[in-house]
Image (cartoon, coloured by chain):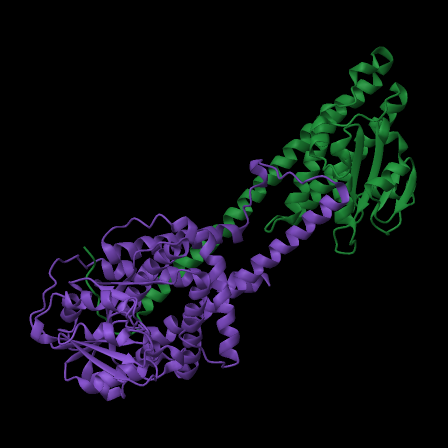
Amino acid sequence: MELVTYTLLFVSLYFEVFLLVTFLEKIAYRKHSAASTPQTYPSVAIVVPCFNEERGLGATLHSLLALHYPAGKLEVIVVDDGSTDKTFAIASEFAPQVRVFRKENGGKHTAMNFALAQTNAELIGCLDADSVVEPEALLRTARVFEQTEVSAVTPGIHVRAPHTLLQHMQNVEYRISIFIRFMQAALGSAFVTPGPFSVFRTSVVRELGGWREGHSTEDMELALRMQAGGHLIANAPGAVVYTTTPRTFRALLRQRVRWTYGFLRNALDYRYMLANRSYGNLGLIVLPLALVSIFSGIYFFFSVVFQLTISLISTYTRVEQTGLLPHPSLELYYVNTSAMWFLVWVAILFVVVLICAGSWIGSGSRKPPLSTPLFLFFYSFLVPIWLSVAVVRAFFNTGVRWR
Amino acid sequence: MPIEPIVNNRTARWGTYAIAFVITAAIFATAFWASVYFNTRRAAEIRTAQDSISVDILSLETQFDLLAQHSCQDISENSVLSKEIQPLGERLAYLETQRGVNQDELTRLKRYYSLLQIKDLLLMQQVAQKCGLKSVFIQYFYSNKGDCAKCEQQGYVLTALSELYPQLRVYSFDYNLDLGALRTLTQIHDVQNELPALVINNKTYYGFKSMDDIGKILPQLKTLKKTATSTAQKLDTNP
């Protein structure tokens, strides 16, 4: 038991250290640059796949129409995937600047493939209808495509106007995601091209056969298929997109179960990449450790719950037998100085460093969000819940739904 | 201003893997070293306290020898020794639960502690007899080899009683400790390996004894003074 704990701690710490070492190596000769204008402007189609998105669609389309990009080079396409609300009517208000299509409900991947068939643009991107982009986002993305070996560019995703405590905690989590996404791209190992504003070379998507259902995570499946085909996925953290995050735990649970389930099932489909040197960093460290992190998250959670239960039973027995409440000593002598405790604190410290690095990459400020302590001490107890649910569902291949 | 993208292929750089491994291994080594360092300091702290108690016992024995010429008031019921010996036991018990403690050193400390307890027990029994003190003595034999399911609970009960009644002197002994004096003590009271075992007023009791059970065995407990803090901590189950 102790050997398993230390092994998982070592692996977790190793991955954090590996990312930070790589970050320092890569960043040593990088500079911030204000230049965001590409030398050429490739034609771009941004697709907004919709299913009952009447609440957020207007803001999404307004932000797309406000993008700083030559008007003749930008095409905004809305594909209403069989909505039963006012989605189509709202989208139609933006015509003719926005091309609006309606089709029978078939899932997000079918909406993207529908749009793919309608456009001749050089680049095709996706923007979920719960997200808005900053005006400079497309210019920063297009610049990266000047490097001909790049097949896709992912953005820097931030939480849009967090209100609830849960959203504030997700805001911190997204800073870590900014760091991880940036580093995965720097290692040539990105395995997700997120729905909010990932942009692809249209020719590559066509060559690969378009989007697939991908266990309800078509963005992960396509990225893995691109990796399998040797295509390069870059990340432009300056291409800022704000996405609406779940307000309630129930909604968050549903979203994260879908993400984790999708990852596990896709990892199974692409298992030949695991520990395969042909896939470089992706096969050797990024994918294997992403899998290990799921199981170690569950293991550490249940270990803590087990220890807490034992401690509670012991305290209850003590009170029952003696009628006296135990009074913990505040003497320095009794401060926990076990190696395990030191390592846990080091791991927490590294997480804070990752949050700061994510903030710096995403916004230029090293300051972590104010809700960081909340994230560190509460969010870690929520994550294992969806990890556990997703593992069970992935094991039984139950499938997951978007809503 | 956000950072510029880094576009890179996925070819592994083994140097980075190795550097990360060395750093992680160094962090682990530091954590284990720090843990051992602090536990060694704890052991040293206990050793110092034991040496101090040893001197106290010698002093008390000398006082006792001189009793003919001095008043019993010179040896109070709450001597420095009795105040120090219980926290020392608690610290030793805590040290026993820690990883990375030198087991030989730990056994040495436990033997020394048990010896100090036996000396204190004998001395305080004589002092109580000669001076007519109200002190009550309990010898508690336990095992932490995993073969005594009720020892933990018995420990809670005795700790609570000694907190409630400062004049109650509880002496705890690891039954399996290899110490001649301890063997003799168990032989005197014919303590068998059926733990937990309590020796109260020269009679041996086996199995878990609750606070009520001990109250029945030792009716004189009711005549002892309770501590103010312990009384305040006691849960009021009988309004």
Quarter residue A191 falls in: bottom left
Residue at figure coordinates x 15%, y 71% from the top left: A142
Q: Is residue A281 above or below residue A173?
A: below
- In percent of width and height, residue B193 lies at 86, 51
Q: Is residue A300 left or right of residue B58?
A: left
Q: Is residue A69 left or right of residue B231?
A: left
Most foreground residue, B59 or A156: A156
Most foreground residue, A403 or B46: A403
Most foreground residue, A213 or A30: A213
Q: Is residue A215 above or below residue B120?
A: below
Figure disc tally: 0
Residue at figure coordinates x 43%, y 65% from the top left: A251
Quarter residue A1 falls in: bottom right
The chain coloured green is: B
Most foreground residue, A271 or B210: B210
- In percent of width and height, residue A143 lies at 14, 69
- In percent of width and height, residue B162 lies at 76, 34
Identify the colour of chain A in the image: purple
Q: Is residue B102 visible?
A: yes
Residue at figure coordinates x 63%, y 55% from the top left: A309
- In percent of width and height, residue B110 lies at 72, 42
Q: Which quarter of the image is occupied by the C terminus of chain A?
A: bottom left
Quarter residue A178 falls in: bottom left
